[in-house]
């Protein structure tokens, strides 16, 4: 009798509590965007990255817009903190509280955000596709989905190149002004000299860890260069299990096998700390290394030593996405165009040193590149960049590739060719699955 | 003339006694002290919102081709039966991750129980620097893993302090990139980090072991070691069951250490844990259905281990 009473009481409280929880849940999942959001105008919210230079750019852009649009004010804030921006954005999409525009949308996450129903098709705006293609040029097609639609605005790239420490090169008795780094043979010979001379512990130190994105800073730039601008997946098929892919993988395997690169992770910046003589990074790093390293940069190597003007690399781009939770999408589209106008792109270049994704960048901003010659080669390189493929299951594709690469190249288990072929087979299945 | 007092109640008043049917039913349903229910409701709401609802929802996701979508988005999330479980258990990476966490638990749980009990007993008897020692053991537990991982990277890297001390005996490849040593190193790290908490549990339990029992054992000629085995260990059995359960549950949820210490479960997945895979599949790759299937399998596995532990170590405690 006593236990029956207790059970009843527990049931009563559970039922009451469940009601409260479900009611809260119902509140949280409400708020769908209205059907006429596409043509609505009014105040909007945007998020941008949390690094100081992009905050400075974002603030001046918002101030300039708000000064002329008192009825369509933009409210801006940094992306909320999280393990990664992609996780925060994914959660915001699910919760229905994503802002109108996010100026830090990673291309690799776009297929997933699109599947979630979180992104607005920018091609649905009357001048959507034409604006993107006019601004970005040929590279724009890399940002289309499989149906040829744009769910992202190509915004800025950080074409990665080989940064090298001139002081360490000099210490190793190498020519720091004209380093021999163009071909794989030259690169390996230079790496061997750097380490054997005792000038440095590691010739180059790409992160050897297993995160899906790490291949963007070891295999992928070199594969882009070796293949003359081929993406990891093209026309729904993996491309990297070809002769070019094997050459690149074998090149990296040699560096690991000979102890010229470390298999162990380094908890800080190995290049800035002088633990490695070279690094693969984009122009965002110029202000970071400015007072720490006496650096210079060269294009990534190829087996044949391709000249700089024909070398491709990974773009490391960040784009702008418009999110379906936005209630004033017409205003958001206008803000998007304003913030990617020639004047604002110039501000972006000036304040961040990152490359706006515009065709013919060096000729569009000759004054900037004349005043900042260190950035010129990145401006030139920006026209020859390869993006991550815009395919379904994009993150899983990269994780599978990383697992295979890590096993056969970094830790030297098994044959590289077989490993790449196995990864290609898995990836072919993934990109064919919705 | 006399007047007679009437026994009739005044008009309008209830004819029911205070213990009428409605209050009785209310009392039956809400108990003698309904305010107690009110006071316990916040915690119950917390348990339902944070544990029960997500668990039920995870079971739902595990049987559907589920993915997170924007409110109002027209998405298809069909029932897929056991397909997610089939996918999970045909994936060698998942099987390996369960094997990895098994190795972890085999090292971490016994080590935690033995070390924390021995150290707590020693601390209980320590006269000098008792507070300092207690704080020293507790500090790693309250320090953020991110900060402590940096120290362990320094200790266990190829050119780290441990390898320098070991000289030619240092393993090759080094601890954190060795398929053999990566998981034991993580288990050692977690044991060290959590030890302070379990020492506190045992210290509390030791206070309830009667001194008379030690005196009796001493009278019977038992030395310190004999007393430890015959008095201390049986005396703290409830705490041992708790330590076993807690270290198993927290160990099975291993995530931060392989994420940070071995760079995402390396080398070659030798330190990948089921929860790390759940994070990759559910959050990064957008397959919460598959991640939930791993989670459900993990919950069932932990419940089985906990049941066995309770049977073996619980004795008559209930």
Image (tube, coloured by chain):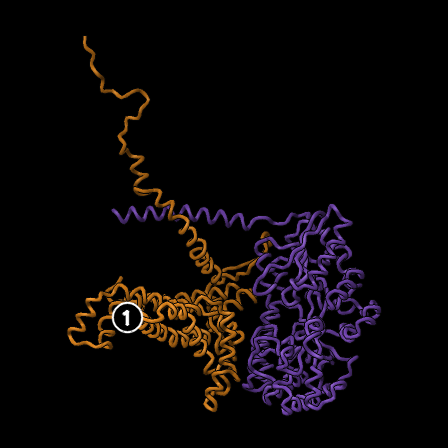
Chain colours: A purple, B orange
Q: Is residue A103 above or below residue A29?
A: below
The residue furthest left is: B220
Measured as percent of width and height from the top left, residue A307 is found at 78, 83
Compare residues B259 and B217 and report the one nearer the observer: B217
Residue A81 in which image quadrant:
bottom right
Please tell me which residue is depicted at 25% across the width and 70% down the height of the picture. B232
Please tell me which residue lies in front, A370 or A97.
A370
- Check the residue under mark 1 and report the chain it is in: B
Query: Residue A145 location in percent, x, y?
Result: 68, 65
Expressed as whole percent of the image width and height from the top left, the position of residue A292 reads 68, 76
Question: Up-down: is A70 above or below B277?
Answer: above
SS at mark 1?
helix
In front of the other: B111 or A186? B111
> Is residue B305 something one can see in this rendering?
no
- Residue A426's image quarter? bottom right
Q: From the viewer's perspective, is residue B217 above or below residue A2?
A: below
- In the rendered image, which residue does mark 1 sit on? B312
**How many numbered marks, from 0 up?**
1
What residue lies at 47% left-to-right and 62% top-to-bottom? B63
Name the residue rendered at 52%, 48% in the picture.
A26
Q: Where is residue A313? Give x, y as percent.
A: 71, 76
Name the side, left or right, on which A396 lies relative to A350: left
Left or right? Give the position of B230 relative to A244: left
Q: Residue furthest front?
A: B128
């Amino acid at each position: 009798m006593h236990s029956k009473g207790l059970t009843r009481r527990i049931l009563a409280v559970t039922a009451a509590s469940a009601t409260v929880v479900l009611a809260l849940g119902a509140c949280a999942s409400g708020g769908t965007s209205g059907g006429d959001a596409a043509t609505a105008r009014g105040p909007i919210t945007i998020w941008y990255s949390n690094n100081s230079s992009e905050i400075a750019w974002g603030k001046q852009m918002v101030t300039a817009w708000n000064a002329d649009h008192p009825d369509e004010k933009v409210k801006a804030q940094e992306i909320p903190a999280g393990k990664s921006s992609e996780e925060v954005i994914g959660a915001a999409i699910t919760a229905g509280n994503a802002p109108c525009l996010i100026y830090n949308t990673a291309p690799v996450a776009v297929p997933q955000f699109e599947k979630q129903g979180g992104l607005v098709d920018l091609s649905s705006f009357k001048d959507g596709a034409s604006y993107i293609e006019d601004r970005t040029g040929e590279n724009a097609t890399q940002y289309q989905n499989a149906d040829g639609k744009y769910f992202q605005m190509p915004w800025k790239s950080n074409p990665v190149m080989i940064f090298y420490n001139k002081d360490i090169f000099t210490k190793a008795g190498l020519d720091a002004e004209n380093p021999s780094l163009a071909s794989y043979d030259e690169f390996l010979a230079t790496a061997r000299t750097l380490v054997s001379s005792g000038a440095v512990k590691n010739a180059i130190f790409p992160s050897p860890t297993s995160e899906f994105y790490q291949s963007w800073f070891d295999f992928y730039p070199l594969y882009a260069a070796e293949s003359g601008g081929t993406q990891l997946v093209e026309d729904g098929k993996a491309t990297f299990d070809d002769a070019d892919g094997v050459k690149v993988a074998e090149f990296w395997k040699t560096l690991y096998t000979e102890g010229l690169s470390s298999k162990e992770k380094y908890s800080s910046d190995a290049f800035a700390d002088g633990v490695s003589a070279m690094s693969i990074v984009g122009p965002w790093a110029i202000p970071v290394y400015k007072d720490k390293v006496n650096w210079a940069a060269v294009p990534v190597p190829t087996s044949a030593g391709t000249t700089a003007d024909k070398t491709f690399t990974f773009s490391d781009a960040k784009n702008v996405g418009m999110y379906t939770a936005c209630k004033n999408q017409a205003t958001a589209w206008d803000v998007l165009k304003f913030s990617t106008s020639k004047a604002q792109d110039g501000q972006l270049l000036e304040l961040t040193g990152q490359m706006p994704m515009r065709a013919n960048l060096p000729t569009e901003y000759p004054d900037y590149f004349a005043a900042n010659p260190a950035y010129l080669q990145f401006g030139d390189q920006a026209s020859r960049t390869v993006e991550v493929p815009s395919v379904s299951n994009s993150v899983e594709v990269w994780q599978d590739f990383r697992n295979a690469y890590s096993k056969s190249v970094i830790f030297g288990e098994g044959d590289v060719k077989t490993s790449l072929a196995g990864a290609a087979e898995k990836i072919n299945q993934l990109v064919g699955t919705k | 003339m006399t007047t007679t007092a009437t026994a009739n109640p005044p008009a309008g008043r209830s004819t029911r006694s205070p213990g009428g049917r409605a209050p009785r039913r209310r009392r039956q349903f809400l108990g003698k002290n309904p305010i107690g229910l009110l006071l316990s409701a916040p915690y119950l709401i917390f348990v339902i919102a944070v544990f029960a609802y997500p668990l039920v929802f995870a079971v739902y996701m595990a049987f559907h081709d589920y993915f997170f979508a924007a409110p109002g988005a027209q998405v298809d999330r069909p029932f897929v039966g056991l397909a997610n479980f089939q996918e999970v258990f045909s994936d060698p990476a998942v099987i390996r991750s369960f094997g990895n966490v098994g190795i972890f638990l085999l090292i971490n749980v016994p080590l935690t129980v033995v070390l924390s009990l021995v150290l707590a007993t020693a601390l209980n008897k320590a006269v000098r620097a008792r507070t300092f020692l207690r704080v020293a053991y507790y500090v790693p537990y309250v320090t953020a893993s991110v900060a402590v991982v940096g120290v362990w990277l320094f200790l266990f890297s190829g050119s780290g302090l441990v390898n320098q001390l070991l000289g030619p005996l240092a393993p090759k490849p080094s601890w954190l990139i060795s398929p053999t040593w990566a998981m034991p190193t993580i288990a050692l790290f977690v044991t060290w980090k959590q030890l302070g908490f379990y020492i506190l549990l045992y210290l509390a339990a030791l206070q309830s072991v009667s001194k008379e029992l030690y005196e009796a054992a001493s009278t019977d000629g038992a030395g310190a070691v004999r007393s430890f085995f015959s008095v201390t260990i049986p005396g703290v059995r409830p705490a041992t069951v708790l330590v076993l359960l807690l270290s198993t549950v927290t160990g099975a949820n291993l995530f931060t250490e392989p994420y940070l210490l071995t760079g995402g479960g390396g080398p070659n997945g030798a330190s990948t844990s089921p929860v790390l895979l759940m994070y990759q599949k559910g959050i990064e790759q957008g397959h919460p259905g598959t991640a939930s299937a791993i989670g459900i399998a993990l919950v069932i596995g932990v419940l089985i281990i906990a049941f066995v532990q309770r049977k073996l170590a619980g004795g008559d405690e209930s």
